[in-house]
Amino acid sequence: MARPITKKSIVSKVKKTMNELGTYRKEFDQVIEVYSGMLFQYQEYEKQHAEAGYPVTEIYVNNAGAENERKVPIISVMETLRKDILSYSNQLMLNPKALGESFEKDDKESPLKAVFARQPKRGGPHG
């Protein structure tokens, strides 16, 4: 049986991944803690949503007694967490987009740039 996922296990995995990518610094620990907490919360909400049968809407009775259909609150919470998780994963360089930007900055000359640099210079826009 697999060990249950905890915030602490997520922190360890994030640090390990960042070490493998060469992006980890001790100064990031506080941000890693927040990011890991959000991932843990998201997974917990995801389990609750699954156990409830993945409802999208629910009937809501307002103060006047009228029934309205509204989005299930857990979906709104999960949407907000998803956006925040993406933002933090960018800051910690844990996704392809963020890594691409970092590697492009570190790359002195890309192979494509090298090919274009070897092309003869032409005068004017048409030759």
Image (cartoon, rainbow, N blue to C red):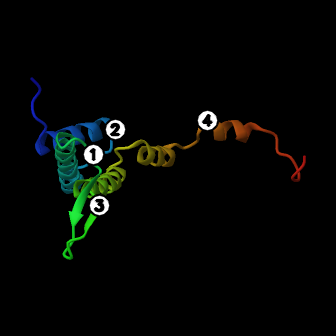
Could you tell which of marks 2 and 4 lies nearer the N-terminus?
Answer: 2
Q: How many angstroms separate mark 2 from mark 1 (CA)?
A: 8 Å
* Sequence-first tag of 2 and 3: 2
Residue under pointer 2: 21
Q: CA distance from mark 2 to mark 4?
A: 22 Å
Q: Nearer the viewer, mark 3 or mark 4?
A: 3
Task: Tell me the SS state at disc 3.
Answer: strand
| Residue pointed to by mark 4 | 111
Residue contact at pointers 2 and 4, CB within 8 angstroms = no
Q: Nearer the viewer, mark 2 or mark 3?
A: 3
Residue 51 location, quadrant: top left
Mark 4 near mark 1, Cβ–Cβ under 8 Å? no
Tag 2 near tag 1, CB within 8 Å: yes
Choose the circle earlier in sequence order: 4 or 1.
1
The one nearer the camera, 82 or 45, is 45
Task: Give amino acid for label 2.
Answer: Leu
- Disc 4 packing (10 Å; few <14; some 14–19; many ≥20): few
How far, Cα to Cα, is label 4 from label 1? 27 Å
The answer to which image quadrant residue 116 occupies is top right
How many neighbours does mark 1 have within 10 angstroms: few (below 14), some (14-19), or many (20 or more)? some
Dot 4 lies on which element? Answer: helix
> Farthest residue in the bottom direction?
64
User: What residue does disc 3 label?
Assistant: 70
Q: Position of residue 31 (x, y in %)?
A: 23, 56
Which residue corresponds to mark 1? 24
70 lies above or below 3: below
